[in-house]
Amino acid sequence: MGWTDTHCHTHEQMAETGSDELLRRAREAGVDRFVVIGTDADTSAQALATAASHPDVWATIGLHPHDAVEGVHTIEPLLTGDLSRVVALGECGLDYHYENSPRAEQREAFARQIALAKEHGLPLVVHTRDAWDDTFDVFDTEGVPQSTIIHCFTGGPDEARRCLDRGAMISFSGIITFKNAAEIRDAAVLCPVERILVETDAPFLAPVPHRGQPNEPAHVAVVGAAVAALKGIEPAEFAAITTANALRAFPRMR
């Protein structure tokens, strides 16, 4: 069993280039499955189209906190169509680093997408940056969907425990290879292996030694090997473990 990139924006890269080269390179690097992520109505539609064209690609539908001002109603029509290739709702959540949308509108959009995930029986993919306390407050107010993924985890052991206590899975990105990411590595050591996912968040956050270049799904093997080393597990075994975790996190991908 090869790697699964549980979070990438490769559909946007492919739309710009008109090429499937990124998927081909990833497959050659041992990546078997891809989850392409919607962040608004347009990118969610792109994700659906990409998943429909590739049997090893699945999509999410979501409204990123940066785009919360657009309103969740803009993505809801996509949830009335064919959802056979849709594995989750999101990415959604809170981002207080950039605050491209007002905090109140971010919280409203986050809460609405939690409700939609429950209504449609879909997992939830969560983006949280510099907003841990409010993220947990929304979870505790609205309730955590049965399958919830904290994508691109950027906290330390304390935040990891709070995620795990609420039943969430934790997804690690290329940040785990960065020199200044000691707390994230400590969180990975703490996290039970059955609750770990790996991702690229491509084209962002390329892992060392590719840092500074556009990221791509092929590099999920680099991310996975870095986490595997922290856990004392061989990469091939860790690929199988994290893919099994992904199949549990996203049941429609089975």
Image (cartoon, helix red, strand yellow):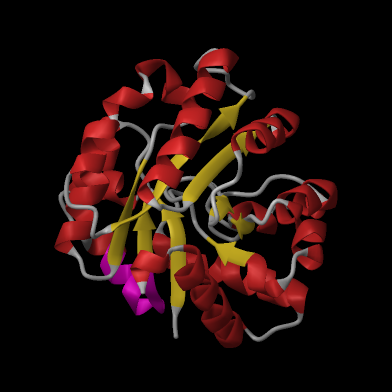
* Extreme residue in the front direction: 119
Q: How many marks?
A: 0
Residue 141: image location, x then y, percent? 65, 32
Residue 150: image location, x then y, percent? 60, 49
Residue 120 in sight = yes
Q: Which residues are magenta?
A: 23-33
Q: Is residue 124 left or right of residue 28?
A: right
Q: Is residue 31 magenta?
A: yes
| On-image quarter of the C terminus | bottom left
Residue positioned 43% across, 51% down in the render:
202
Q: Is residue 199 above or below residue 145?
A: below
Residue 181 in sight = no
Residue positioned 25% across, 59% down in the render:
85
Residue positioned 58% across, 57% down in the render:
207
Q: Nearer the viewer, residue 58 or 145?
A: 145
Residue 46: image location, x then y, percent? 22, 43
Residue 186: image location, x then y, percent? 82, 59
Q: Is residue 228 above or below residue 100?
A: below
Q: Nearer the viewer, residue 98 or 143?
A: 143
| On-image quarter of the N terminus | bottom left
Q: Nearer the viewer, residue 136 or 130?
A: 136
